[in-house]
Image (spheres, rainbow, N blue to C red):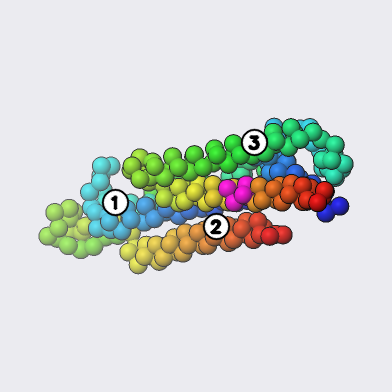
Amino acid sequence: MRIDGQNVQAFDLLTRRIEGASSIRGGQRTNEARETAPSEAAESPSANFAETLSDFVSDVNTSQESAESASADFADGRSDDIHGTMIKLQEADIKLRLLGNVRNRALEAYREIMRMGA
Amino acid sequence: MNVFSAMEIAGSGLNAQRTRMNTLASNLANARTTQTEEGGPYRRLDPVFRAVPVGDRFENLDNSRSAYLVEVPEIRADEADPQRMYDPNHPDADDDGYVALPNVNVVEEMVNMVTAARAYESGVTLMQSLKGMAQSALSIGA
């Protein structure tokens, strides 16, 4: 049960984040659908999770890139927006940390499943 | 509404205070300026702040009233009369020996400068707490 719970937790965290960030699937998933996420997550094929994860990774990558270009602009003197640059850097940092945490949870769940036979 | 729109709002506040700092610098630098392009002494500038709903790209418009950004739509000149000082030797003195000086009160501008700096600081503090919240949220279950 614990494995399932963790899996769902990671999945739910991801989908919520993705829905917030890209709104690609916003129209299709309602709150009721999210309530029934456990069974859905158990049934959904692994490709869906992988897709969601790669969407999230590309979102994190986009913000890393924009933070990088903002700090390059600032260093070159093309921009004088000190706090705008810092905000972008912080945003990228928080998103990267979230991605790291999600990855840890997913890996932990995977290891737990692999231990089942032992 | 997510954690980053709060960042955006705080950022707009920082922008507004920075603009205010620019006008304050202009006012202080021109506190004794008697000549301008429009003629007459320099007039004190004051930024106008306006609240605009957060343009949340990811959410329904129903919730757009939940928070506001601040923007500076214009910088207005203070219409108060210039100060008049008796100084017959001044090159811009009128026939009666009076000089029209800018309607800038240096002491007042210094007070405004301190409030602008403090408001900027409060925006930065808000962002730090926001980041702290996000980080403590990430440590849930760790």
In this orientation, does residue A102 appear?
no
Query: Is A106 positioned to the left or the right of A99 in the image?
Result: right
Q: In the image, residue A111 lies at what x, y percent?
A: 73, 49
Q: Nearer the viewer, residue A98 or A29?
A: A98
Depth check, front residue: B69 or A43: A43
Q: Which amino acid is tagged 2? A: Met
Residue that appears at 84% across and 40% down? A42
The Cα atoms of the two marked residues, 1 and 2, are separated by 37 Å
Closer to the eye: label 3 or 1: 3
Q: Position of residue A90 (x, y in %)?
A: 52, 51
- Magenta region includes residue A98: yes
- Residue marked by disc 1: B42
| Residue plotted at (61% across, 39% down) | A57
Q: Are marks 3 and 1 in contact (CB under 8 Å)?
A: no
CB within 8 Å, label 2 to label 3: no
Tell me, yes or no, whether dots 3 and 1 are on the same chain: no
Say whether mark 3 and mark 2 are on the same chain.
Answer: no
Magenta stretch in the rendered image: A96-100
The subunit carrying tag 3 is A
Q: Which residue is mark 2?
A: B127
- Is residue B142 visible from the viewing direction of this image? yes
Q: Which amino acid type is shown beneath numbered disc 3?
A: Ser
B136 or A47, nearer to the observer: A47
